[in-house]
Amino acid sequence: MPSSSENIEENTRFSDNPQFEEWTGQIMTMLFKVNGHLSTLQQFIKTLQKSQEQGNTRSKMVANIDKKSVFHVEETSTLLKSINDLVHKINGIQEVALDKAQLISRDKLTRDVKYSVQEFQEAQKEFMQISKSMNEEAKAALAEDEQTRQESTSFAPKQQVVIEREAINNEEFAYQQNLIQQREEEISHIESGVLELNEIFRDLGSIVQQQGHLVDNIENNIYSVATDAQSGARELTKAMRSQRNSNRWCVRILLVVSVLLVMFILVVFS
């Protein structure tokens, strides 16, 4: 059992670690932002999927949601890179410089980050799939429009050509072409970041695995201390009960002796 001087030394040693607190605070703040971006992205993905089911993939509303989704993907990726750097910093702190609560907190925070990365990976994959699918549909629709325009120009009367061009005029045609090109560039950019995100996820998995043994030992020690404390409490309860029983017997014996003494006195002096 550690002496009181050892306890004082340990409390002084582990009482404060401002660098650890600063980094964990930054991680929690950025993780909160990540979850906000992720939640919005997931809602946008559902909206895009619904629009695709309804055959409404060429509207400006869908293009706007698609562009905003890309923004949330990029912001989340940037935040996760910064968080990963901070996770490495807090895990670079030696174990002896942290108390048990901080070690467990570090492990939980790393696991939370890993979970957010995994959730973002799934959302990112889902967004890329819907974007590629929408782009293929847009290309097919644009090719069909182009073919219709060419056929109208070659065979239809002049008045009919004007009517056909009103359905998708030159400006709209150019807009759709530009939209398809932008979406392809966005998909390519996101795919290039997927590899880096996968590396971050594997990295975090390795850290969590390394921490697992340490935290298990800490939790086992805590459980052992709790078990010893419960056992001690039970023994103390038994001792108190035994003491109370002993006190009762002492009182009974004293009463018997007192009665015998009184009877002896009465016999002697009667």
Image: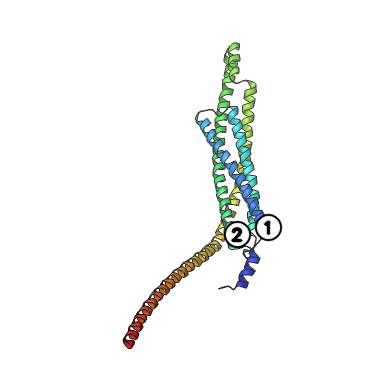
Q: Residue furthest right?
A: 19
Which quadrant is the C terminus positioned in? bottom left
Q: What residue sits right under mark 1 in the picture?
A: 19
Q: Residue furthest bottom?
A: 268
Residue 57: x %, y % from top left: 55, 29
Query: In this orientation, does residue 192 appear?
Result: no
Q: How is the image coloured?
A: rainbow
Q: Counting residues from the N terminus, which is met first, the one under dot 1 or under dot 2?
A: 1
Query: Foreground residue, 20 or 119?
Result: 20
Q: Position of residue 159 (x, y in %)?
A: 60, 11
Residue 100 pos. (x, y %) = 58, 62
| Labelled disc at residue 102 | 2
Name the residue located 60 percent from the left edge and 51 percent from the top edge: 200
Identified by mark 2, the residue type is: Gln
Give me the disc on residue 7. Answer: none
Q: Is residue 53 left or right of residue 257?
A: right
User: Up-down: is 104 above or below 57?
Assistant: below
Mark 1 in CB contact with mark 2 (< 8 angstroms): no
Work out which quarter of the rendered image holds the N terminus and state it. bottom right
Q: Position of residue 144 (x, y in %)?
A: 55, 24
Amino acid at circle 1:
Gln
Seen at 56% across and 57% down, the residue is 208
Query: Crowding at label 2, few (<14), some or many (≥20) Cα neighbours within 10 Å?
Result: some
Up-down relation of residue 117 to residue 222 (above or below): above
Residue 233 appears in the rendering: yes
User: Foreground: 225 or 200?
Assistant: 225
- Tell which of 190 and 40 is nearer to you: 40
- Secondary structure beneath dot 2 equals helix
Q: Quadrant of residue 203?
A: bottom right
Residue name at image x 61 percent, y 31 percent: 64
